[in-house]
């Protein structure tokens, strides 16, 4: 089961306790999945995900006291999965649209979700109808595809109203509202009631951050080790040249001491050289001496060139 399916399975179980939130969630589903039959002017809900149709059916049964409002149809696709459809009669269509405060254009009006809880319920319905989530192990991407620009603009505004940065793009004639930030996606999941999925995403996000921090630290340490080895190799070459040119005896006692120390520990870091020297000189002191040795070696090289 992919991550989107997990979220929708969790949301399928969630039925709002208040009537106004049930209406708002059903309104979100109808806004995304509803279509008016051109021949009969009757409302139909269609989804390739039968879970969404079953959720709409559960909400309808909670909202209407009569038993059989809407004819439920399920089709078996070639893949063996079910796709669902709810077909409403003319009278049922009229009653449902009146309840959802919608016209035949099926556009949701803000009056449908004036309360914060209703906004969350509406978003849940819209996500159930046309939302997708990328597996957070791979990437962070939350999106909802709308049929028209007006729906997408209203949805974007609704999400932004919760302090979440949503953006809009047109893709293959669909107007897509999306969120890329991992923390904001986590907040969105919490808003629509997918707490389990939100916790899973948070765990993955924390694990990724720890892994990235460790990788950065390892890379930094590796780079420092390479730099230290390159520096010590250059210092050994400088010392070898000084000895070859018989200049060792002409060095000061401090520089002689440092030459012998580096020869004894050719791959040691500055901190290790300080320790091996009995902490009598600090890192800056050892570094200064090694630079002086390097300058002497460079002068010898220049003399050779002349």
Image (cartoon, rainbow, N blue to C red):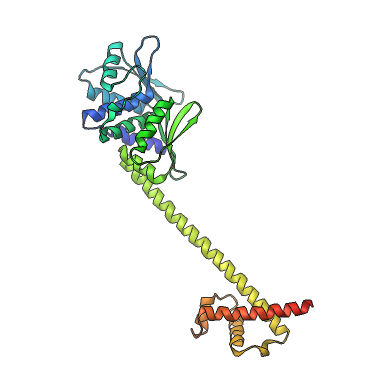
Q: In which quarter of the image is residue 241?
A: bottom right
Asked if 110 appears above or below 246 in the picture, the reply is above
Quarter of the picture containing the N terminus is top left
Q: Quadrant for the C terminus, please.
A: bottom right
Along the line of sight, the residue nearer the viewer: 146 or 111: 111
Q: For the view shown, which residue lies furthest in the top direction?
A: 39
- The one nearer the camera, 3 or 295, is 295
> Does any portion of residue 142 appear in the rendered image?
no
- In the rendered structure, the answer to whether residue 244 lies left or right of residue 12 reads right
**So how many labels did they put on this image?**
0
Q: Which residue is drawn at 49% across and 59% down?
A: 216
**Residue 144, position as x, y percentages in the image:** 41, 32
Residue appearing at x 34%, y 13% in the figure: 42
Please identify the quarter of the rendering in which residue 132 is found.
top left
Residue 152 in sight: yes
Question: Percent x, y for residue 265?
Answer: 58, 79
Residue visible at 28% across and 14% down in the picture: 94
Nearest the camera: 83 or 203? 203
- At which x and y percent is residue 243? 69, 84
Decide: is 111 above or below 140: above
**Which quadrant of the figure has residue 242?**
bottom right
Q: Looking at the picture, does residue 301 appear above or below residue 91?
A: below
x, y percentage for residue 247?
70, 87
Is residue 81 or residue 215 the one in the foreground?
215
């Amino acid at each position: 089961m992919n991550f989107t399916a997990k979220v929708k399975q969790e949301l399928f179980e969630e039925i709002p306790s208040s009537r106004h939130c049930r209406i708002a969630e059903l309104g979100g589903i109808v806004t995304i999945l509803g279509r008016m039959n051109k021949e009969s002017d009757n409302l139909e809900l269609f989804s390739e995900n039968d879970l969404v149709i079953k959720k709409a059916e559960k909400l309808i049964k909670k909202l209407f006291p009569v038993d059989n409002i809407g004819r439920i149809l399920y089709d078996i696709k070639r893949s063996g999965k079910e796709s669902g459809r709810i077909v409403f009669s003319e009278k049922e269509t009229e009653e449902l649209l009146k309840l959802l405060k919608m016209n035949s254009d099926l556009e949701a009006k803000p009056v449908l979700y004036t309360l914060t809880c209703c906004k969350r319920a509406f978003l849940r319905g819209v996500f159930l109808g046309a939302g997708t989530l990328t597996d957070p192990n791979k990437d962070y991407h939350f999106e909802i595809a709308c049929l028209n620009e007006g729906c997408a603009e209203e949805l974007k505004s609704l999400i932004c109203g919760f302090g979440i940065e949503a953006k809009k793009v047109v893709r293959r004639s669909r107007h897509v509202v999306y969120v890329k930030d991992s923390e904001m996606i986590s907040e969105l999941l919490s808003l629509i009631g997918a707490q389990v999925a939100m916790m899973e995403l948070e765990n993955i996000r924390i694990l990724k951050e720890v892994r990235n921090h460790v990788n950065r630290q390892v890379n930094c340490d590796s780079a420092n080790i390479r730099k230290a080895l390159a520096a010590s190799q250059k210092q050994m070459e400088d010392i070898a040249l000084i000895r070859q040119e018989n200049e060792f005896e002409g060095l000061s006692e401090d520089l002689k001491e440092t030459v012998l120390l580096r020869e004894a520990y050719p791959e040691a870091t500055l901190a290790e050289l300080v320790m091996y020297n009995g902490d009598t000189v600090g890192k800056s002191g050892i570094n200064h001496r090694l630079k002086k040795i390097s300058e002497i070696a460079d002068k010898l090289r220049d003399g050779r060139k002349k």
